Amino acid sequence: MKARVFVSFKPTVLDPQGQTICGALNSLGHKSIAGVRQGKFFELEVTPDATKEAAGKEQVRQEIEQIARDVLANPVIEDYRIEIMD
């Protein structure tokens, strides 16, 4: 089982790197690009033993949620989204 965690700035937080990328794209002739928001992507591999039953899968989801909230994202300025893949 794998879990993917996508982390990005909250919409209210300025993203200077995204703005720079947007400016560079516009300079390269990509005028249709109005905005860019950059983020981070993490892929976590879960041991097979942890996911043998439905209860185990729910525990893994809760653990990934805690990892995303406490370690991977800064909840003050970032949002995160989790995808669980079997």
Image (cartoon, rainbow, N blue to C red):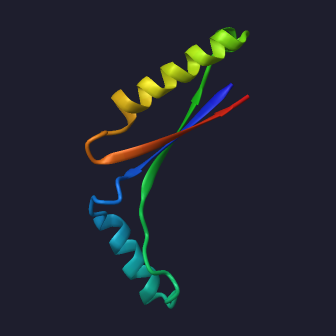
Q: Position of residue 5 (x, y in %)?
A: 52, 39
Quadrant into which the C terminus falls: top right
Q: Is residue 9 left or right of residue 33?
A: left
Closer-to-camera residue (61/46)? 61
Closer-to-camera residue (5/26)? 5
Residue 23's quadrant in the figure?
A: bottom left
Residue drawn at x 39%, y 46% as measured from the top left: 79
Q: Position of residue 37 (x, y in %)?
A: 42, 64
Residue drawn at x 41%, y 77% as measured from the top left: 22
Q: Position of residue 60 (x, y in %)?
A: 57, 18
> Is residue 73 shown above or below 19?
above
Closer-to-camera residue (11/29)? 11
Residue 70's quadrant in the figure?
A: top left
Q: Is residue 74 left or right of residue 62?
A: left
> Is residue 83 shown above or below 45?
below
Q: Is residue 52 left or right of residue 36?
A: right
Residue drawn at x 69%, y 25% as measured from the top left: 1
Closer-to-camera residue (28/53)? 53
Q: Position of residue 55 (x, y in %)?
A: 65, 10
> Is residue 17 shown above or below 26?
above
